[in-house]
Amino acid sequence: MNIWKVAFFILSGTIILIAALVIYWATSPMETEIPTPKATESKSTDSVLSVETTAEDFEKLAIKYIKQELSSSEIPIDIQVNDSVQLSSEIVAFGYNIPVSMKFNPVVNEQGNIHLVQREVNVGSLNIPPSMVLKLMNQAVQFPNWVTIRPDEKEIFVDLSKLTLPSGAKVKARDIDLANNRIQLEIVIPNQ
């Protein structure tokens, strides 16, 4: 048998095996549980402030904290808040930068944390499943410990109980109503 035929079949088999492994990795479910948030109970000596803000001001605040936390990340992430929360970034595939934009609906849970439920995803002109985009983003970007990417649930969990402001204050979300441009937050400031 010709050595070139053997080399061709070995190379073809290797490429097929690698492609199968990539497809398996991209479509396999990823176990990501919501971390149990520690209770952010206010003490009787703490000051509790209720703050109502607009989507524009909330966007500025989110950009500040995300940019600060992701300053060492090689992949840029941009946030916009209007009728939904939009994340824009890039994925590098085969030497090409492919623009990615995702839209999320924010949902506040009982503990005052935020679930960003994925509503729409655009990856250049490619047709890629939303869970795969979240999985790629989770592996490419080192998010802060208060942000959990959950690809199988198509959501990003923002655990505000782990976010501490420089003054030691804690933040809780009370209501996010982007349709009416109203966001209510509660800030607990320790007085001791």
Image: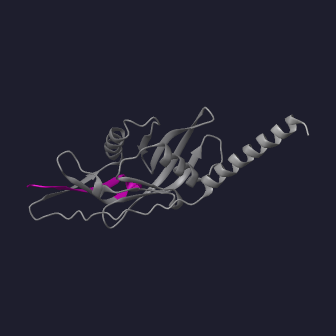
The quadrant in which the C terminus is found is bottom left
Q: Indicate whether residue 190 is drawn in magenta.
A: yes
Q: Is residue 130 left or right of residue 165?
A: right
Is residue 72 shown above or below 122? above
Q: Where does the image place residue 126, in percent across and percent down from the top left?
A: 65, 44
Look at the image and tell me whether residue 184 can be seen.
Answer: no
Count of labels in the image = 0
Q: Taking 182 as reference, is 98 above or below it?
A: above
Q: Position of residue 139 (x, y in %)?
A: 49, 47
Q: Specify the farthest residue to the top.
A: 95
Residue 64 located within the stretch drawn in magenta: no
Q: Which residues are magenta?
A: 176-192
**Extreme residue toward the right, this view:** 1
| Quarter placement of the N terminus | top right
Taking 66 as reference, is 120 above or below it? Answer: below
Q: Is residue 67 left or right of residue 167?
A: right
Residue at x 31%, y 56% (from the top left corner): 160
Q: What residue is drawn where x is 20% and y is 45%?
A: 166
Q: 92 or 160, which lies in front? A: 92
Between 108 and 67, the residue placed more toward the observer is 67
Q: Is residue 95 visible?
A: yes
Question: Along the line of sight, which residue is nearer the eye, 81 or 158?
Answer: 158
Q: Name the residue nearer the viewer: 189 or 120.
A: 189
Q: Quadrant of residue 180?
A: bottom left
In the rendered image, the vertical position of residue 24 relative to residue 37, given as above or below: above
Q: Quadrant of residue 107?
A: bottom left
The residue under the point 19% across, 52% down is 169
